[in-house]
Amino acid sequence: MRWSLVWLVLGAAAAIAAPHVFDSLTARHLLVLIAINVILVSSLDLLIGGAGLLSLGHAGFMGVGAYASALLVKAGWAFPLGIVAALVAAAVAGLVVGVPALRLKGHYFSVVTFIVGIIITILMTNMVDLTRGPMGLTGIPFARLELFGWEHTFRTIIEKVGYYYLTLVFVALALLLRWRLGRSRFGRALAAIKGDENLAESVGIATYRTKVTAFVIAAAVAGVAGALYAHYAVFLSPDSFTFVDSFDLFVMNLLGGAGTVLGPVVGPTFLVVVSSLLRNLSPALSHVVYGVILIVVIVVLPSGIVGGVRNVAARLQGGAGRGRAGDAEAGSGSGQRAG
Amino acid sequence: METVVQLVLNALHATSLYALVALGLTLILGVLDIADFAQGALYMVGAYVAYYATSGLGLSFFLALPLAMAVGSLLAMTNYVAVYRPLRRFSGATTFIAALGLLLILQNLALLFFGADFRLVRAPFAGVRFGVLGATWTGYQVFIASSVAVLLLLTWLFLKLTPIGKRLRAVSQNRKGALVVGLDPFRVELVAFALAGALAGAAGTLASGVNAFDPSIAAIVVITAFAIVLFAGMGRVPGAILGALHVGLAETLTGGLVNTQYAELTAFVLMIVVLLFRPRGLFGAQEAKL
């Protein structure tokens, strides 16, 4: 316990120091992107790592939140209300999708979430009156906060550090939520569903309702991340929320290690940096590498980077007890037998 | 009335192409329980084979068709041996993710090598026109519909009559039972992939003469085809074909009578409505049967 506290303090210090260590505009841009992706992946991990629900439409919910907040704040709402609206809109979308999709088991659920993600993109593209479709939504206001007479507008195009810290607050909240939910009665119910859904049902867990609840929570958090993205980029187009983006989030989660505490931080950090390096060479190449990384991770490292490191550490220590606990928690790869 | 007849005629060839891909997906789902989204990439490769064979090598379109089927078949078998077989100890969901990875890899490799320009292959019989109840059907559309009919018939005969086809059905109906009586699953699975790959390659080639394509067609086609499979219900060959017919008709009629923008949503909406009220699909049996 004391060690994890030390790691927590070190991690927080690193996150706070990061924009001053890497002080170029590009590096700070990547830091904000990493932070937003950490929120997304930690919410996705509630489904994948927590319940073994391989949802593949997560970017769609991010998009719902992004457009909700962008349109409302553009219409005159305050930025914090925009965030709340994004949360509510994405939660509603999650409910509408989750109710039919969660009737399906295993990979049929994954396929349907995948297709729903595509439907959301098509709707964003076609509802031109609302979203301006493929032309993209411009003129989204910068985030503006007023607290006890203090006020600040985050002009993210020239000044990224302030917005990075704002996002970091939400990162902390998202990770805290993921951690607390994992240790709650609700989280244990999800873990039971992941292990064996019929068994969970037979010991009195309302599996369907639990899964729908988790799906709605994950969608709501993704909506908040979308709002943060909207007021950072101040431009939205359906291209930012396609099935490829959902897939990227999925890869981040598996690569970092689904069901681990650090996984949702490690995965996005690694992949955002790698893909931005690759994208400078060629965008198509970066997606080829994504695909290859994904397949290699599934085959070689089923519990992700964090799980892999933990297994190696456990083997070095010879401490079988700790290692095995880590395996059970981290084993998204082995846990996927549930389907 | 004439527009409706015309739309139905147009739907017929769109439908028949979906039917080929949906059938391949169904075969693989039946034998291996893999949602093989990489089939979309084989469709795309089939289209590019037709393009480069006809405009690059100067081959006839009728030679390009078997060539594309062979290439699709080979690629599908490669995917199976290199990716799916090593993953067989994992669940369907894991292999589904790997399939998406493959789709992404192949689609973006195509983007790197073939570029993002839209291509259209010069179709045979383009000048021939038939009048049907005041609407016109081009010779090429007739060629597509009849080629698909022949391919579906051949597949059906293959599954019903040949020993390996019978084994394939056996594995898909009862995998454990088939293994108990000593069937080699590797050969059966390989054949399922080879067959599905050939069908997808053929569909891609046939489509290349009517619809302009770029590498992104891979994802679009396989997603629609999979929506058809879910809509119709897993596992049954006639289901895949009937499902394609329904979705193809609904899509074309929506596009023609309501709004082209929402035509691409039709398949998905149908799928979700069916799943809500009948999660096994419209024609789905309790268990997968071929």
Image (cartoon, grey):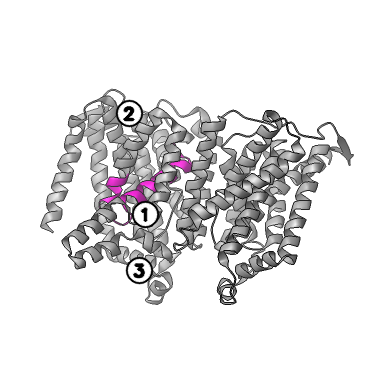
* Residue at image mark 1: A300
Label 3 crowding class (10 Å Cα cut-off): few <14, some 14-19, many 20+? many
Q: Residue B29's x, y, as percent?
A: 58, 60
* Residue at image mark 3: A192
Task: Give the side of residue A233 with respect to residue B61, left or right.
Answer: left
* Residue at image mark 2: A142
**Quadrant location of the N terminus of chain A?**
bottom left
> In the rendered structure, which amino acid carries the disc numbered 1?
Val
Q: Residue B31's x, y, as percent?
A: 59, 63
Residue A293 appears in view: yes
Q: Is residue B118 above or below residue B15?
A: above
**Residue under disc 1 on the same chain as residue under disc 2:** yes
Label 3 close to label 2 by CB (< 8 Å): no
Label 3 close to label 1 by CB (< 8 Å): no
Label 2 crowding class (10 Å Cα cut-off): few <14, some 14-19, many 20+? many
Q: Residue A222's x, y, as percent?
A: 37, 46
Label 1 close to label 2 by CB (< 8 Å): no
**Residue under disc 3 on the same chain as residue under disc 2:** yes
Q: Which mark is residue A324?
A: none
Q: Chain of mark 1?
A: A
